[in-house]
């Protein structure tokens, strides 16, 4: 009987191999949620499909991981976070900074990009750096946004610069932050040049400018805490795609420069 069972196992393995399958391999799926209004990082295109730099990164990771398949959904910021927290989605993509609170609530991936912050100010403003905002105001950002954490960290490390900044309790739109500068409610908005350019182009403001970089952070995917296997697989792919220059080349396509090289120059890596 043992010999017959062994023959059946050999034949089954051979049949699977002939079909291009493996007796030991198991196809795994991950449900990925991308935030809808965060161009050029993640957004929904005119056909209702996911788009942006991070979507392209995710496709590269999916291609690298032969035993994983990613399924994508595009949702708003709050729903994406809640869905990843409760396990409806396995991973959240939306230009997230690594923060202590996020590392407690989620498994956090290795960095797949670097985010550089600029200021949006009036054309006639003399504000060029965060130090120039001493005694002035920055548009409110929701407290759970990594930008708010980064800004608070900067202010803590620069106690002599007193910036008027009040985090929001609920999520707000970045376009509203820039509108606050346009309307004179705030002296500056704190976001990336890419995000600012997308909003300025859409809004048609002609009396605002974007400063040079004033700060920077790495960005990571947030993974449901019950899925360490996905974290390990994603990190393996990110490390390989970073090492061979694939992600650096992709940042050149989207942002006009190698963000990984810039981050190294700024001491962020």
Image (spheres, helix red, strand yellow):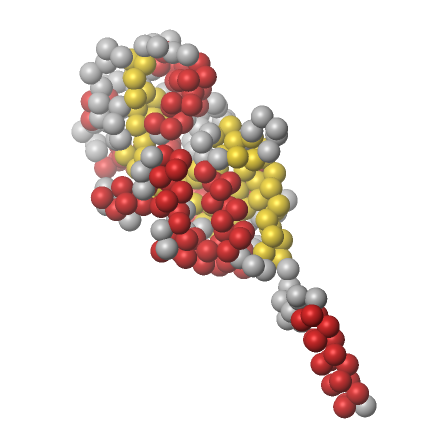
Residue sitting at x 47%, y 30%: 38
Specify the quadrant of the image occupied by residue 75. top right
Who's the residue at 28% across and 45% down the image? Answer: 261
**Residue 214 visible, this orientation:** yes
Q: Is residue 133 above or below residue 267?
A: above
Measured from the top left, where is residue 211 in percent x and y?
26, 23
Report how many numbered discs are placed on residues in the image: 0
The answer to whether residue 217 shows anywhere in this view is no
Relative height, residue 77 to residue 93 (above, below): above
> Which image quarter is the N terminus in?
bottom right
* Left or right: residue 3 compared with residue 53: right
Q: Which is more toward the observer, 212 or 160?
A: 212
Q: Could you say where residue 189 lies in the image, as x and y percent from the top left?
A: 34, 22
The residue that appears at 36% across and 51% down in the rendered structure is 245
Determine the image quadrant of residue 142.
top left
Q: Is residue 143 above or below residue 109?
A: above
**Residue 115 location (% of width, % of height):** 35, 37
Q: Nearer the viewer, residue 130 or 26?
A: 26
Q: Spot the residue most to the left.
A: 160
Pinpoint residue 83: horizontal percent, then vertical percent. 60, 40
């Amino acid at each position: 009987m043992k010999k017959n069972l062994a023959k059946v196992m050999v034949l089954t393995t051979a049949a699977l191999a002939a079909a291009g399958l493996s007796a030991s391999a198991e196809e795994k799926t991950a449900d990925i949620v991308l935030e809808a209004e965060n161009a050029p990082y993640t957004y929904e295109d005119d056909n209702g499909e996911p788009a942006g730099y991070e979507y392209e990164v995710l496709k590269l990771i999916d291609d690298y991981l032969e035993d994983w398949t990613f399924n994508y959904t595009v949702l708003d910021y709050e729903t994406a976070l809640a869905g990843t927290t409760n396990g409806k989605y396995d991973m959240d993509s939306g230009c997230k900074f690594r923060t202590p609170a996020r590392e407690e609530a989620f498994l956090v991936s290795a960095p797949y990009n670097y985010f550089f912050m600029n200021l949006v100010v009036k054309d006639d403003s003399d504000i060029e750096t965060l130090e120039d905002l001493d005694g002035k105001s920055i548009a409110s950002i929701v407290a759970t946004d990594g930008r708010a954490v980064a800004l608070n960290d900067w202010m803590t490390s620069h106690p002599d610069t007193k910036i008027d900044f009040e985090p929001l309790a609920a999520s707000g739109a970045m376009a509203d932050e820039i509108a606050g500068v346009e309307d004179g409610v705030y002296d500056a908005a704190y976001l990336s040049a890419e995000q600012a350019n997308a909003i300025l182009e859409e809004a048609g403001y002609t009396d605002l400018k974007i400063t040079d970089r004033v700060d920077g952070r790495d960005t990571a995917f947030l993974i449901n805490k019950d899925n360490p296997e996905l974290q390990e697989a994603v990190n393996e792919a990110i490390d390989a795609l970073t090492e061979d220059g694939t992600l650096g080349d992709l940042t050149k396509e989207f942002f006009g420069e190698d963000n990984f090289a810039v981050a190294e120059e700024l001491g962020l890596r």
